[in-house]
Image (cartoon, coloured by chain):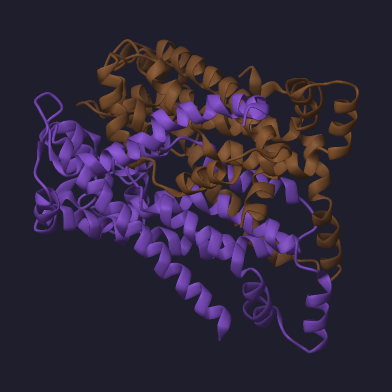
Chain colours: A brown, B purple
Amino acid sequence: MTTAATPRPTTGAKPSRGAGPTTGAKRSRRPKGLSAHVFLIIAVLISVFPFVWTIVMATNTTRDIYKSPPKLIFGSHLLENIRGVLDTIDFFGSMLNTIVIASVTTVLVLFVDSLAAFAFAKFEFPGRKILFGTLLVFMMLPLQLAVLPQFILMSEVGWVGMLKALVWPALSNAFGIFWLRQYIENGVPDELLDAARIDGAGFFRQYWNIALPMIRPAMSFLAIYAFVGAWNDYVWPLIVLTNPDHVTLQVELAQLNVGHNTDYSMVMAGVLMASLPLVIVFAIFARGFIAGATEGAVQGS
Amino acid sequence: MLSYWRQYLAISPFYLVFLVFSFVPVFYSLYLSFQRYDGLGTKQFVGLQQFEFLWSDPVFWLSIRNTLLIWVLSTVPTLFGALVLATLLHSVRRFKGFYRIALYVPNVTSIVAVAIFFGAVFSNDFGLVNAILGTVGISPVPWLSNPWLIKVVIALLMTWMWTGYNMIIYLAGLQAIPQSVYEAAKMDGAGPIRTFFQITIPIMRPIILFTVVVSTINGLQSFSEPQVLFASNAANQNLGGPGQAGLTTLLYFYQSAFLDNDYGYGAAIVWAFFVLIIVLVVINWRIVQRGRKS
């Protein structure tokens, strides 16, 4: 959460999108595009419907939902369902675990990746090409290839069931370096670094005082990317967090769905409670995030 | 060498973690695939035995078939829908930002939440979909027990989650196409559909290729969707729902490695699976490339 609050990713990322709106405006000098809006609105309805229906289910009782025809409007049983969730799983405990893991992971990913990306973007050193190439190759590999040995490693060092077992593998985030390097190469002028060098600034001063402040938009994107990724991760926590006291939100949530009860209203209240924080964070940072995501994708292709 | 110590120091935190948690593990899992190992006893070298067993294991092939079907059922509508939506979005002037965010938001929700939601909505007895079908007089459809419909539901789930993501990428590509190209086409009397197929798609080919590769890598890794959707069956080892129709290869890997503690076999499954991904990516690549030449 803390890192996601890096000031306004929107403003910094905007210039790169500058070409977009203008061309779009030129185009729509043609017919008004009413049919396009109709199709887009239908798509938006499909896209948003699950969120709405989750709320409908979570605010009603399961009985009302199962009636035929089902109740299609918001009800008044939300608090009751929330209480059901809190009675069934350790919601706040697992949420706290998730917040801690996601925040620590995000901060460390940002630091480790930006430092390495800066070295790769602006300095020559022996082995640079090979090291970076290896990273690109590994970016393409399915992560599952490493999961089993990672688990064996975790049991060797006795970290199975512990939260740090989630943080360390997440730091091996090759995408972040790849993406930041690209941004630093174009976004941080060599002249500035040269000037700083003449003034006697060393490698780390150049990184900390010049590069870091200039790559804020890229860092905010990576922060949200890493945070959302850590928050939503399911497979690895499911495998490695065997200790019931140290479970993440996603694992707890899946747990809610197992078992004999088919109290769907309660389950959907849990889904709502687990999804809402992230959707709100996303809504706040969406513009900058989406702009950042497209930059990476288009340059990367 | 020594004069570069700062640069090496700067990249070393990442490379240490990378080495320990990515680089070595990938090769170690290859090594494991030639061993018999249950995680507790000693490893025993068995050569290609695991792979021979894999070759004749009907469940493995079932899981491959399931994975491929789910992948096709989800990737084709996802990419096509994304391209159509991106084109529409590119053509409108107002509410652009709103559409982008509203269509992207499915991608930031967690797979677990989405899978639980789809499980509830497509539930055989009480789900909303069957309830709606009921009001128009159609008898309940067994969404979560018919082997085909199970795959359709999983594919729908993935389509819902990933269409917006791909749309954003296509939109960025569309915005990079110079307007003069379209004006020239219009002068030559090309309608919107011809323009789409003869100008937009050819120019967008590299970006489409990118999304195809990413979708192949992502789509073949479906694990959480069936795992959460049919979680209630986890206890009886019947992962992937009735008839194991939703058992994807990664789910089978999970079962072999972590539920049956057959580490060697689990490693063989992921490596065989990895080879499959490579083959598919290469095939996709060639198809898209060939299209360019003609």
Residue situated in front as seen by the camera: B289 or A67 = B289
Q: Is residue B163 left or right of residue A179?
A: left
Q: Residue at x 35, y 57 (%)?
A: B277
Residue depicted at x 29% and y 24%: A153
Q: Position of residue B259 (x, y in %)?
A: 16, 32
Q: Quadrant of the N terminus of chain B?
A: top right
Residue extending furthest toward the bottom: B188
Answer left or right for A278 relative to A169: right
Nearest the eye: A269 or A247: A247
Residue found at x 40% / y 53%: B219
Q: Nearer the viewer, residue A86 or A112?
A: A112
Q: Position of residue B23 (x, y in %)?
A: 40, 37
Residue A282 in the image: x percent, y percent? 62, 32
Residue A10 lies in quadrant: top right
Residue B162 pos. (x, y %): 50, 50
Question: Do we see residue A67 in this rendering?
Answer: no
Residue A102 sits above or below residue A22 on the image: above
Residue A138 found in image quarter: top left
